[in-house]
Image (cartoon, rainbow, N blue to C red):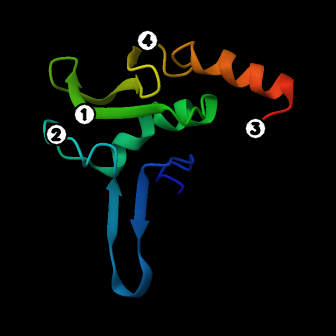
Amino acid sequence: MRTPDGRECPYYYEDFHRGHSTQECRLIGRNPRSERWEPGVCRRCPVPEIARANSCPNMVLEGEIVHRWFGLVRRVEVYAICTEYQVEVDDPYVGCGHCHPQAAQLLSRGER
């Protein structure tokens, strides 16, 4: 679904149909340690770019809103884990490094 700033995000949800007025981030909303989400946070969120760059089905994202610059700037920090190899992903834009070579081998053999 499109975020308030116009980018496509798999975790953003809104419903304005028949009197509803719901906007939420399902990535931030499931983290109890995070601060409250507001639509303005989407503007600087890295998740839409991560989802566009890496579509690995084994990568799970977790996010939370943190304060930077003496509490003046709110940002989304993203933490990624590979569920296939049970490792922390250093660069979520690229992936864990184990899954993609495996997928390339399957494609070269003609398997899916």
Separation (CA) of disc 3 from disc 2: 41 Å
Viewer-nearest of discs 1 and 3 = 3
Q: Earlier in the sequence, mark 4 or mark 1?
A: 1
Q: Earlier in the sequence, mark 3 or mark 2?
A: 2
Residue at 85% of width from left, 23% of height from top? Answer: 108
At mark 1, the secondary structure is: strand
Mark 1 and mark 2 in contact? Answer it, CB < 8 Å.
yes
Separation (CA) of disc 3 from disc 4: 27 Å
Q: Which of the pair 96/84 is nearer the observer?
A: 84
Separation (CA) of disc 1 from disc 2: 6 Å
Q: Amino acid at mark 4?
A: Asp
Q: Quadrant of the C terminus?
A: top right
The label shown at residue 90 is: 4
Residue at 51% of width from left, 47% of height from top? Answer: 9
Q: Amino acid at mark 3?
A: Arg
Mark 3 and mark 4 in contact? Answer it, CB < 8 Å.
no
Viewer-nearest of discs 3 and 2 = 3
**In the image, residue 82 above or below residue 30:** above
At mark 3, the secondary structure is: loop
User: Image quadrant of residue 78?
Assistant: top left
Q: Earlier in the sequence, mark 1 or mark 3?
A: 1
Q: Where in the figure is residue 92, as x and y percent of width and height?
A: 49, 21
Q: Which of the pair 69/55 is nearer the observer?
A: 55
At mark 4, the secondary structure is: loop
Q: Where in the figure is residue 33, as x and y percent of width and height?
A: 13, 36
Disc 2 marks which residue? 35
Q: Earlier in the sequence, mark 1 or mark 2?
A: 2
Q: Amino acid at mark 2?
A: Glu
Q: Where in the figure is residue 98, as x and y percent of width and height?
A: 57, 14
Separation (CA) of disc 1 from disc 3: 37 Å
Q: Earlier in the sequence, mark 3 or mark 4?
A: 4
Disc 3 marks which residue? 112
